[in-house]
Image (cartoon, rainbow, N blue to C red):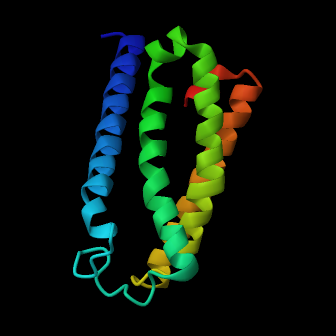
């Protein structure tokens, strides 16, 4: 097998692993919705959070769990090469929407929630780092697209 074929095959495997992880996370989030609407404080994630799920934390929590599935599904659509080639204008609009949802909903809500984690400071720092890194990656992807550096934009 040549080097190009090996890289192509590894890239294809990596893309399918990413799709699998995204779908797994998506199913995990949506399958817990019955415990969130209305809040079931006996459920795994909400256990012990009776004192947190009000005010600004509740706003951040519900913003996060409602916008995340959209961002995950939209991200899968945006990563699909054949859809991108067939519908370039829609790809650009969905990309703009993706950037907006992530930067204005997911990152701020994730940062807010990270400050109130019940798992300790290390976990809270990790969640904050994840939110900031996600925002940074989205900004870099957007910049690469605006610069028309599409190879870098895809990765």
Work out which residue is located at the far right of the displayed protein and give it.
147
Query: Residue 115 location in percent, x, y?
Result: 55, 79
**Total numbered labels placed on residues in the image:** 0
Quick check: 142 above or below 106? above
In this view of the protein, can residue 105 be seen by the observer? Answer: yes
Query: Residue 61 location in percent, x, y?
Result: 47, 69
Work out which residue is located at the far bottom of the displayed protein and give it.
51
Query: Residue 101 location in percent, x, y?
Result: 59, 47
In this view of the protein, can residue 114 be seen by the observer? Answer: no
Work out which residue is located at the far front of the displayed protein and give it.
38
Location of the N terminus by quadrant is top left
Q: Residue at x 56, y 56 (%)?
A: 106
Q: Residue at x 66, y 35 (%)?
A: 96
Which residue is more in the foreground, 22 or 15? 22
Location of the C terminus by quadrant is top right
Quick check: 130 above or below 57? above
Picture quadrant where residue 41 is located = bottom left
Quick check: 68 above or below 7? below
In the image: residue 124, left or right of residue 33: right
Which residue is more in the foreground, 138 or 113? 113
Q: Residue at x 66, y 54 (%)?
A: 104
In the image: residue 134, left or right of residue 80: right
Q: Residue at x 35, y 43 (%)?
A: 22
């Amino acid at each position: 097998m040549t080097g190009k074929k090996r890289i192509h095959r590894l890239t294809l495997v990596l893309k399918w692993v990413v799709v699998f992880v995204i779908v797994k996370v998506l199913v995990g989030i949506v399958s817990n919705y019955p415990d969130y609407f209305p809040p079931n404080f006996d459920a795994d994630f909400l256990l012990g959070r009776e004192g947190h799920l009000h005010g600004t934390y509740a706003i951040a929590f519900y913003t996060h769990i409602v916008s995340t599935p959209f961002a995950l599904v939209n991200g899968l659509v945006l990563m699909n090469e054949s859809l991108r080639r067939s519908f370039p204008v829609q790809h650009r609009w969905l990309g703009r929407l993706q950037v907006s949802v992530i930067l204005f909903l997911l990152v701020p809500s994730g940062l807010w929630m990270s400050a109130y984690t019940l798992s300790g400071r290390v976990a809270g720092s990790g969640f904050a780092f994840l939110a900031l890194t996600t925002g940074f990656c989205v900004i870099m992807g957007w910049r690469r697209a605006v610069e028309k550096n599409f190879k870098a934009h895809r990765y």
